[in-house]
Image (cartoon, rainbow, N blue to C red):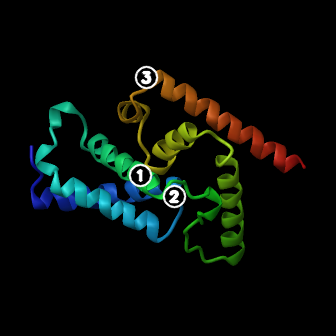
Amino acid sequence: MQASENDWDAIYAEQLPRVYNFFRYRVGDGPLAEDLTAVTFEKAWRSRIRYRRYLGAFSTWLFSIARNVATDHFRKNHKELPLDNARFHSDPTLVEETVQRRHDFAHLLKLLSQLSARERELIAYKYGAGLNNRAIARLTHLGESNVGTILNRSVNKLRAAWEDEDER
């Protein structure tokens, strides 16, 4: 099934924030996340004729492309960017709220950097891209219950580390 241009506009509008957020969790905010998002959509557009609805949801196919784009990027650059380089992007009216959000996001990124690469990737899919466990399982070739278990343990690790630091 090939997406028409009208369908593509709707798909792009719906999926753009999810794909960008996936890359935010993988490489941080800014031009690099934007560039990788653009590469993902360009590759999806060029290969849209190969998408087969009966094989899975469009978002699963699109995030397979995004995952490959991220892998290619890391392979090409031989390293991952530290999560400390990512910044929270918001435009709140209160300066105090902005400062607190940036502090909290920087704190979260520090804690995320202590997780394994697989845990960070699953968290990026779940919370950055907003994918459900079934879609994540298809993308990572893990069992759906395994994805849920890893995510649960990872979130519990993050919570415990957050609380430990708050008590200090």
Q: Residue at 54% across / 54% down in the picture? A: 79
Alpha carbon separation for disc pair 3 and 2? 26 Å
Residue at numbered disc 3: 143
Q: Residue 98 carries which label?
A: none
Q: Where is residue 36 in the image (x, y as percent from the top left)?
A: 38, 61
Q: Which of marks 3 and 2 is nearer the N terminus?
A: 2
Amino acid, disc 3: Gly
Q: Distance between the residues labelled 1 and 2?
A: 9 Å
Q: Name the residue under label 2.
A: 27
Q: Which residue is drawn at 71% across and 56% down?
A: 107
Q: Residues within 10 Å of mark 1 (few under 14, many from 20)?
A: many
Q: At x 41% / y 52%, what residue is drawn? A: 70
Q: Of marks 1 and 2, which one's residue comes earlier in the chain?
A: 2
**Disc 1 vs disc 2: Cβ atoms closer than 8 Å?**
yes
Instruction: Tell me residue 137's x, y (percent).
Output: 40, 30
Cα separation, mark 3 vs mark 1, equals 22 Å
The answer to which of 74 and 116 lies nearer the viewer is: 74
Q: Mark 2 belongs to which amino acid? A: Val
* Residue 37 picture location, percent across and down: 36, 61
Q: Nearer the viewer, mark 3 or mark 2?
A: 2
State which mark lies toward you, 3 or 1.
Answer: 1
Q: What element carries label 3?
A: loop
Please give the residue where the numbered disc 1 appears in the rendered image.
70
Left or right: 72 in relation to 94: left
Count up the numbered dots. 3
Tell me the SS state at disc 2: helix
Query: Observer-nearest residue: 65 or 6?
Result: 65
- From this viewpoint, which residue is outermost toward the right? 168
